[in-house]
Structure formats: C-alpha cells, structure tokens
Image (cartoon, helix red, strand yellow):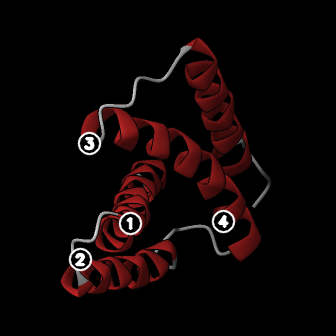
Amino acid sequence: MDTVRSIVLFVLAAVLEIGGAWLVWQGVREHRGLAWVGAGVIALGLYGFVATLQPDVSFGRVLAAYGGVFVAGSLAWGALVDGYRPDRYDVAGALVCLAGVAIIMYAPRPR
C-alpha cells in the first residue's frame, strides 16, 4: 500500500511542480499576467508540501527519486499541453529515469 501511495504522491507532486512552472512561464513569457504567475507560485508551494507526505523518511532519497519523475512528467506535460512530440531518445531517457525511481524508492531494503 505504501508503494501505491508513494506513486500517487509522486504524480501529484509532478503535476503541481510542472504545472506551477508552466503557469509562471505562461504569465511571464507569454504575457498572460500576474494572476498566472501567482497561481504558479501557489502550485509550486503546494508541490513542496506534497513531497513531505511521502512514506519514506529520507529527504535525499525522495527528492533524488522525484527527479526521475520530473523528467518523465515534463516530457508528458509537453506532449499533452504544449503539443511537443518526444522522440525515441526522449522516451528512452524517461524510461531510464523511471527505472531509477523504481530502484531508489522501491528496492527491497532491510527495515
């Protein structure tokens, strides 16, 4: 059950962080205004909070593993929201990152 919870929290964290950064980007780079920037800042703050809810107590492990989720999530966000089409190397790199997440977070360890 902890693994499912952890995966859900990683996905939620990615949506908040990537979405928050995207909102700031839209507000500044696409001149959509301060409301977009503010919404992005709030989402980024919520990301920081969600990361603390991971079942693993090691900050370093959680954030290291999240890096792989961020890579894959960023490519997925780009494809779904901005029309970016990842090439086979993007996909391969994202899969390597997700394999790293699985090893870092879910490999059996003595308790």
How far apart marks 2 and 4 lie (CA) works out to 26 Å
Residue visible at 63% across and 46% down?
A: 68
Residue 78 x/y as whole percent: 38, 40
Q: Are marks 4 and 1 in contact (CB under 8 Å)?
A: no
Instruction: Say whether residue 48 is visible.
Output: yes
Disc with the residue nearer the chain's start (4 vs 3): 4
Residue 12 x/y as whole percent: 35, 60
Identify the residue under disc 2: 36
Residue 58 vs residue 84: left or right? right
Neighbourhood count class around disc 4 (C-alpha, 10 Å): few under 14, some 14–19, many 20 upward: some
Q: Are marks 2 and 1 in contact (CB under 8 Å)?
A: no
Disc with the residue nearer the chain's start (1 vs 3): 1
Neighbourhood count class around disc 1 (C-alpha, 10 Å): few under 14, some 14–19, many 20 upward: few
The nearer-to-camera label among 4 and 1 is 1
Residue 33 x/y as whole percent: 22, 80
Q: Quick one: which residue is furthest to the right in this view?
A: 110
Identify the residue under disc 3: 81
Q: What amino acid is found at the position of numbered circle 1 in the picture?
A: Arg
Residue 39 vs residue 88: left or right? left
Q: What amino acid is found at the position of numbered circle 3 in the picture?
A: Val
Neighbourhood count class around disc 3 (C-alpha, 10 Å): few under 14, some 14–19, many 20 upward: few
Identify the residue under disc 1: 29
Residue 53 vs residue 40: left or right? right
Front residue of this view, candidates 39 and 51: 39
The nearer-to-camera label among 1 and 3 is 1
Identify the residue under disc 4: 63
Instruction: Say whether residue 58 is visible.
Output: no
* Quarter-of-image position of residue 45: bottom left
Neighbourhood count class around disc 2 (C-alpha, 10 Å): few under 14, some 14–19, many 20 upward: some
